[in-house]
Image: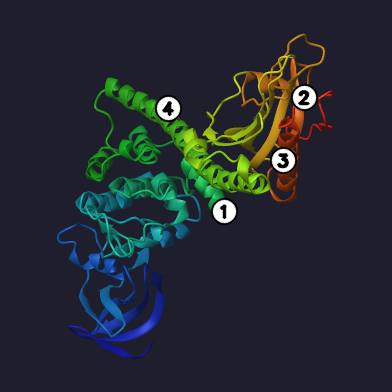
């Protein structure tokens, strides 16, 4: 493209490629002795957002558009040629930051732009590469993923686009960006300007996600407390707690002005301390939200997975004994399925969610149980007080951390105790009793059936086993197992 020309309102000669940004490519350009940067924005869905650049009215410190037009396959914007980017300035500083005075000057220019845009346009990708020095002012550029603040829908909102080192917690959660999202990126830039390092170093994207969502940055030292407090407030996890874009310029104006009285100076210092405490509170709250979201995703996966398991067991048993299946209008009540053969009844129930901390005792198993269900086989109580057996179904990561799946297991009274149960073995959910049975020491309960994964060949074995038990229970004389545990129970679960 170098050496060619493009006719807009004026005729521009295209020079060397300067780089890319947003949707397009940027080249040096000249017209009648005036230097510019010409950007070609491909006509892709959502790309016209780049043209927000053109219609920002009297907003201060926005890189101006000096010409515009279009070609067959691109919109074209011409801007003044910038002297440098804020990234160039940071690189020139050699990793040590640019100092408080210079940093406040740069931040004030950015704050003026954010204040003028507040409530109108959300930039959504504010970073040093998108802050350019034009005519002695630091100006915002590259509005390729921005949107009008009141826009809720569009053909392509670029909702998931972000620069990881500067992305706010709500962007990591794929939530709606607001002016507070730009305030967060402003805080990251401010932190980097005065320290020479970002508040969160990553290095990888999963690390950055964890840090932006769940960690607090190191407290800023050797800075005016008013500046340090403002930066830390911008980095709050909760978007609503961050300073408004319209307030940043005013607060920066007082950074280099000493407090007029000792009392006000002490109050500023106390405010800084409270900001640090609130940042920690925000981190804890954000972590709780993320944990809740994680459990919700796992619960959804558990229910979907259970539907297949439930269907496989029901189909296999119903096919083997079609006359025994209870009519669906009766069997499906309360999300359970029932099958009756003779006096024996097998029943499966739908899974329910567990609490985030279900064990209720110290020293509980370290694995996480997301949902529980059970499968039971019952007969009318016999003369020995025996009514059948039930096995628990847990969706958990009992065997390998982070690897979740449905497992069958069951419990029993310890042989040395005098306690008895009408069901043997029996199902339990995660709680103090099951935690004791799963512990390393001796307890009144113990595991009677080993963790059995409900998938593949293991599921085939589960179906065959319950089909055999149902056949046995349908005949008179079915009774409690003579020996328990009936099979070896290796202690393979995480303890």
Q: Real-space Cα distance between discs 3 and 1?
A: 50 Å
Is tag 3's residue or tag 1's residue first in the polypeptide sequence?
1
Query: Considering depth in this image, is 352 or 257 the residue closer to the camera?
Result: 352
Q: Earlier in the sequence, mark 1 or mark 4?
A: 1
Nearer mark to the viewer, of 4 and 2: 2
CA neighbours of label 4 inside 10 A, class few (<14), some (14 to 19), many (20+): few
Left or right: residue 442 versus residue 213 is right
Q: How far is mark 3 from mark 2, CA to CA?
A: 17 Å
Q: Which residue is mark 4?
A: 277
- 82 left or right of 449? left
From mark 2 to mark 1, how far is it between C-alphas? 64 Å
Residue located at (50% from left, 47% from top): 209
Residue that label 3 marks = 467
| Element marked by disc 1 | loop
Picture quadrant of residue 142: bottom left
Query: Is label 1 or label 4 in front?
Result: 1
Q: Which residue is mark 1?
A: 204
């Amino acid at each position: 493209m170098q050496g060619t020309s493009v006719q807009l309102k004026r005729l521009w000669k295209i020079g060397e490629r300067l780089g890319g940004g947003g949707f397009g490519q940027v080249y040096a350009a000249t017209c009648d002795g005036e230097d510019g940067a010409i950007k070609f924005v491909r006509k892709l869905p959502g790309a016209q957002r780049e043209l927000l650049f053109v219609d920002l009215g009297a907003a201060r410190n926005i890189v101006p558009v000096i010409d515009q037009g279009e070609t067959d396959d691109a919109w074209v914007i011409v801007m003044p040629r910038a002297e440098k980017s804020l990234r160039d300035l940071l690189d020139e500083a050699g990793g040590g930051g640019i100092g408080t005075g210079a940093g406040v000057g740069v931040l004030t220019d950015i704050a003026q732009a954010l204040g003028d845009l507040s409530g109108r346009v959300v930039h959504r990708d504010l970073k040093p590469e998108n802050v350019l020095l034009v005519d002695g002012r630091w100006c915002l550029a590259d509005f390729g993923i921005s949107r009008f603040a009141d826009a809720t829908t569009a053909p392509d909102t670029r909702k998931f686009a972000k620069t990881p080192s500067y992305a706010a917690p709500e962007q990591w959660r794929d939530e709606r960006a607001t002016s507070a999202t730009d305030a967060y990126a402003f805080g990251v830039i401010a932190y980097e300007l005065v320290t020479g390092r970002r508040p969160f170093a990553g290095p990888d994207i999963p690390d950055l996600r964890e840090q932006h969502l769940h960690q607090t940055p190191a407290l800023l030292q050797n800075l005016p407390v008013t500046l340090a407090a403002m930066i830390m407030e911008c980095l709050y996890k909760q978007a609503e707690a961050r300073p408004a874009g319209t307030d940043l310029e005013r607060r920066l104006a007082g950074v280099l002005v000493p407090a007029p009285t000792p009392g006000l100076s002490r109050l500023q210092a106390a405010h800084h301390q409270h900001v640090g405490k609130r940042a920690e509170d925000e981190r804890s709250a954000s972590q709780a939200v993320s944990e809740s979201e994680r459990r919700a995703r796992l619960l959804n996966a558990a229910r979907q997975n259970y539907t297949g398991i439930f269907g496989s067991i029901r189909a296999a048993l119903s096919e083997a004994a079609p006359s025994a299946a209870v009519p669906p209008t009766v069997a499906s009540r309360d999300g359970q399925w029932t099958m009756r053969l003779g006096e024996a009844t097998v029943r499966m129930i739908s899974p329910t969610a567990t609490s985030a901390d279900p064990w209720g005792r110290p020293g509980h198993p370290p694995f996480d149980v997301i949902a529980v269900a059970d499968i039971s086989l019952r007969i009318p109580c016999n003369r020995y007080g025996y009514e059948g057996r039930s096995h628990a179904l847990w969706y958990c990561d009992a065997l390998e951390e982070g690897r979740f799946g449905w497992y069958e297991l069951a419990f029993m009274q310890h042989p040395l105790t005098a306690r008895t149960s009408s069901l043997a073995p029996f199902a339990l959910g995660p709680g103090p009793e099951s935690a004791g049975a799963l512990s390393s020491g001796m307890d009144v309960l113990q595991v009677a059936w080993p963790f059995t994964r409900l998938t593949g060949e293991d599921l085939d074995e589960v179906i065959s086993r319950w089909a055999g038990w149902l056949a046995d229970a349908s005949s008179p004389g079915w009774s409690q197992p003579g020996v328990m545990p009936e099979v070896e129970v290796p202690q393979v679960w995480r303890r």
